[in-house]
Image (cartoon, grey):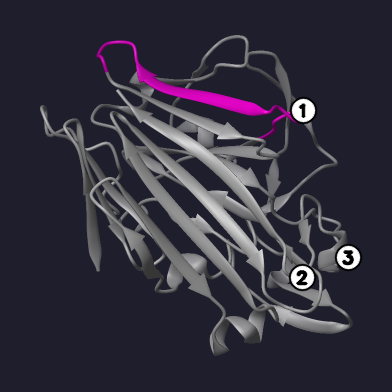
């Protein structure tokens, strides 16, 4: 089911399936900022990644000696959320455990996702609570895909913090920490189809309190800013070799398994741990200009 947030500047559509951001339109120009999920290229808009980000090695993990299987990016994106609070400018969705999730992730939990529309900005807040009696391991990430109206070659992404970052390549969808190189963010990253020939471009954010990205086209007024708070990693992704007219900017509080990971979720790079009855909050802001 689609639900709507709206103000003078933007109309936002969100889907109860996956609590997924599905559309952001400029009310004056009718410009659509979000990729419209053409399955010939990639059939999603902006999935929420939980309770893992990326892929598990061999698609399984061990917890307390027991084996659990889970697909890439986890299950939140494919589950129906309940709406627990809503008005014209904000909405809060909630997902809790069910028989299907317990079979792959043995925790009682609450994942609340709140979207707040303020002028030309959409604020996204994630609240994760451990409702179980044991320590809970998890990751969470955002995966918004931004619509491109021209060739990808006309767009660039600037990491507004500047500096240099560890670039973490993927090897069969796993993080290859044995082959890290350096990404220079002192100049904008010029996008092209070839930029994605080795899959997503992933950086370690150096522990920044805030990491800010700008997607822009030098020949137009188009710009999207993504400001993520305390994210550990970030990915930039589009299709290759298919010419999908979108690019994703993905703040992550977690990352795909290392190529030499031993399957123990407790030892997973980037994993977060939450004690019983505790909660953790994460957020990002997206400005549509």
Q: Give the range drawn in magenta.
A: 203-221
Q: In this view, does 226 lie to the left or right of 55?
A: left
- Say the numbered circle drawn on residue 198: none
On the image, the x and y values in percent for residue 129 come to: 64, 65
Answer whether residue 209 is magenta in the image. Answer: yes
To which residue does mark 2 refer?
A: 276
Tell me: residue 67, above or below residue 3.
below
**Residue 288 shows in the view:** yes
Alpha carbons under labels 1 and 2: distance apart? 38 Å
Answer whether residue 146 is magenta in the image. Answer: no
Alpha carbons under labels 1 and 3: distance apart? 24 Å
Q: Categorize mark 2 by other alpha carbons within 10 Å: few (<14), some (14-19), many (20+).
A: some
Tell me: residue 254, above or below residue 212.
below
Q: Categorize mark 3 by other alpha carbons within 10 Å: few (<14), some (14-19), many (20+).
A: few
Closer to viewer: mark 1 or mark 3: 3
Alpha carbons under labels 2 and 3: distance apart? 25 Å
- Upstream in the sequence, badge 1 or badge 3? 1
- Tell which of 58 and 224 is nearer to you: 224
On the image, the x and y values in percent for residue 225 come to: 43, 26
To which residue does mark 3 refer?
A: 262
């Amino acid at each position: 089911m689609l639900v709507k947030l709206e103000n003078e500047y933007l109309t936002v559509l969100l889907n109860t399936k996956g609590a997924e951001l599905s559309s952001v339109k400029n009310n004056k120009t009718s410009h659509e900022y979000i990729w419209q999920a053409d399955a010939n290229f990639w059939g999603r808009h902006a999935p929420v990644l939980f309770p893992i980000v990326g892929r598990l090695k061999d698609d399984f993990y061990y917890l307390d000696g027991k084996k659990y299987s889970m697909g890439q990016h986890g299950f939140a994106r494919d589950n129906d959320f309940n709406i627990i609070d809503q008005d014209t400018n904000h909405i809060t969705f909630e997902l809790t455990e069910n028989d299907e999730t317990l079979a792959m992730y043995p925790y009682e939990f609450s994942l609340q996702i709140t979207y707040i529309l303020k002028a030309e900005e959409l604020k996204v807040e994630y609240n994760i609570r451990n409702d179980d009696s044991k320590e809970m391991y998890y990751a969470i990430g955002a995966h918004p895909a931004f619509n491109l109206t021209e060739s990808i070659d006309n767009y660039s992404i600037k990491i507004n913090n500047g500096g240099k970052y560890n670039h973490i390549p993927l090897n069969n969808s796993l993080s290859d920490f044995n082959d890290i190189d350096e990404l220079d963010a002192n100049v904008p990253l010029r996008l092209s189809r070839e930029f994605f020939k080795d899959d997503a471009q992933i950086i370690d954010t150096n522990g920044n309190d805030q990491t800010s990205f700008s997607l822009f086209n030098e020949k137009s007024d188009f710009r999207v800013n993504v400001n993520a708070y305390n994210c550990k990693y970030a990915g930039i992704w589009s299709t290759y070799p298919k010419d999908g007219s979108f690019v994703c900017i993905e703040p992550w509080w977690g990352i795909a398994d290392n190529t030499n990971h031993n399957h123990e979720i407790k030892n997973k790079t980037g994993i977060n741990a939450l004690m019983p009855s505790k909660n953790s909050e994460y957020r990002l802001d997206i400005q549509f200009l």
